Image (spheres, coloured by chain):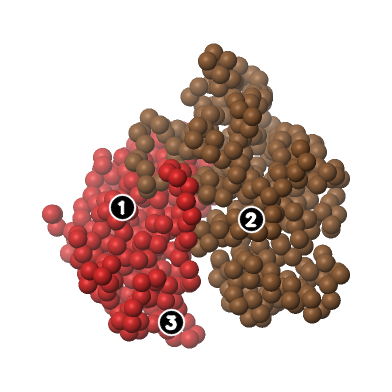
Amino acid sequence: MNDEILRVENLSRHFRVGGFRHGGTLHATDEVSFVVARGEIVALVGESGSGKSTIARVLAGLYPPSSGSITFEGKLLGKKSSRAVRGKMPMVFQDPFGSINPVLRVGHSLARSLKLHRPELDKDAREAEAITLVERVGLLPGAEVLRRYPHELSGGQRQRLGFAQALASRPSLILADEPVSMLDVSIRIGLLNVMRELRSSEGVSLLYITHDLASARYVADRMIVLYAGRVVEQGLTQEVIASPQHPYTRLLMATAPDPRLPLPADTDVADLGEPPKVINPGPGCRFAPRCPLAMDVCRSQTPTPVFLSATQSVSCFAVEKESHVS
Amino acid sequence: MSQAILQVRDLRVEYETASGPAHAVEFVSFDLHPGEFLAIVGESGCGKSTLLFSIAQLLTYPASTVGGQVLFEGRDLSSMGAEELRQLRWRDISVVMQSAMNALNPTISIGAQLADTCRAHTDWDDRKIAERSAEVLAMVSIDAAHLNSFPFQLSGGMRQRAMIAMALILNPKLVIMDEPTSALDVVAQRSLMRQVEDLRRELGFAVLFVTHDMSVVSHFSDRLAVMYAGEIVELGKTRDVFDRPRHPYANGLMDAFPSLVGEPRELVGIAGNPPSLVNPPVGCLFAARCPHATERCHTTRPELLPVDGHLVRCHLVASGEL
């Protein structure tokens, strides 16, 4: 594919936990593979502990991968990512209060990004560029915003600033790690709209990491559902939402609170379990202990992705069996 | 309707700040009936947690209740002394705090913490305490074997359920919950809400529930109060408020979160930020962000008035213009 911008293959990241003798290996992500195309918004959806942030951090070069490969803009990334790569694939963090230096004016942090990533600009050009950047994310008037200190901005404004900063290096892919989950409901949608606008006006791709299926549906073209470090289902957003195939995706859909829907019957969401600890996981599907469809094979073998359409794939023996029968 | 168990009348809370008092809660009034589930929703800084703390008489400096009354079964809580309040707490009113899962003492077993509560408020013997502890854990679907477990051995959802078990151990008439689900995943959140609902049906306690995420309570609460900048702007039956929000702020909130059903459509959210609570505007507190605001909205503060079974604080709704 020509317009492919990021290809992740069999990416795993493990952490050593506990002591020397009794310690274990925590499998934060295991054999994750996916592709992001140019100008596409892809959502990584999962509960806490599903490994979604770990993937973003590995992509951003904050941790090296334990195994697997990352190809970005046609080049295989090494263990250490260069400044050029980081500039092309910046990250927007979850906490808008912890990710901006509080003692420096807004303009300073932006100017610094520009200095590092776009050294060809002189001082005046940098200033002009900084104003364009903040105005592009809806912070108006730009010149005045740049003179403010972070504490003078609200959470939503700070998070917009995070996107402006990410834009400074003319990225091709922005890693957005739960960018709206700490914001108030009425502010969130504005930021989601900023993400959509950036995609259409700048042609930038976004990897949107979230636990909120509804917001993923709102912004994303494709959706990747993670459970306990593995991809359980991926496909076009409308496919996954209209016909979720994996039992875990179905559980997520059934439990997502939506005031517009009647409350689903008790039996739909009787599940009281929680995601497993992924320290020294055994073989088998990690969802099997909670799965209503679990069979013997689910506990002994790890399911591999089965394509149900050109775009939708699911890793589940039960679904596989059913699709063979029908 | 039966006599209200909790009556809140014109409650006002202020925070002392360097630039003068911040009006965190302004003239909040409502009744809560036995066995009723009232949800209070609002965004951060709207005063919803402050309101709960004021009702539970737990405010500490720099916050203080500066006006109004809180009547529990007709008795004024604010005029009670520490000992009188102690008698009431846990037995009649219990509180489940935000991130309650971190409120458990990490060095003591769950059973010992439940027993502590019982010893402080009852004269039960050890056997009775053990029996009741196992019983309340079973109510929240935790195996009695976990009485000997330490908090770190339980998952987040289980710890949160253990806190709810602790709140119910003396069979209170009112349980106050401050965002008990906000640290949980959607799956755990749903099962916790369902459990609270089942227990309320079974045991008949009233619930006062505060949250920023109104979709959490949409299927569970009887009535819903929407707060903005310290005031209740709309109060009505939960279903009605969701289906037909009248106040422009409530309306904006309902339209601010994406859905999993229906045609995908553009959403806009609410532009702007909440007003300063230290120097609040003279008119309607929402006027600056309101798409319908008129001259009068900027000059006169609206009252909370009944409109088709809701209480709504808006000039335009009251006069039928909206």
Q: Please identify, in this view, whether the residue under mark 2 or under mark 1 is nearer the observer.
A: 2
Residue labelled with disc 2: A200
Residue occupying image coordinates x 69% and y 31%: A280
Residue labelled with disc 1: B243
Crowding at dot 1, Cα within 10 Å, few <14 / some 14-19 / many 20+, comes out as: few
Residue A204 in the figure: left or right of residue A197: right
Secondary structure under badge 1? Answer: helix
Checking the image for residue B151, the label placed there is none
- Across and down, in percent, residue A225 comes to 59, 38
Instruction: For mark 2, name the chain.
Output: A
User: Marks 3 and 1, Cα distance to the nearest angstrom?
Assistant: 34 Å
Instruction: For mark 3, name the chain.
Output: B
Dot placed on the residue nearer the N-terminal end, 3 or 1: 1
Residue occupying image coordinates x 59% and y 47%: A220
Residue occupying image coordinates x 75% and y 77%: A127
Residue occupying image coordinates x 39% and y 71%: B290
The tint chain A carries is brown
- Across and down, in percent, residue A32 comes to 70, 36
Crowding at dot 2, Cα within 10 Å, few <14 / some 14-19 / many 20+, comes out as: few
Residue labelled with disc 3: B278
Up/down of B220 relative to B60, above or below: above
Say what amino acid the circle numbered 3 marks.
Val
User: Marks 2 and 1, Cα distance to the nearest angstrom?
Assistant: 33 Å
Say what amino acid the circle numbered 2 marks.
Ser
The tint chain B carries is red
Query: Foreground residue, A287 or A21?
Result: A287
Secondary structure under badge 3? Answer: loop
Quarter containing the N terminus of chain A: top right
Instruction: For mark 1, name the chain.
Output: B
Query: Foreground residue, B298 or B31?
Result: B298
User: Marks 2 and 3, Cα distance to the nearest angstrom?
Assistant: 41 Å
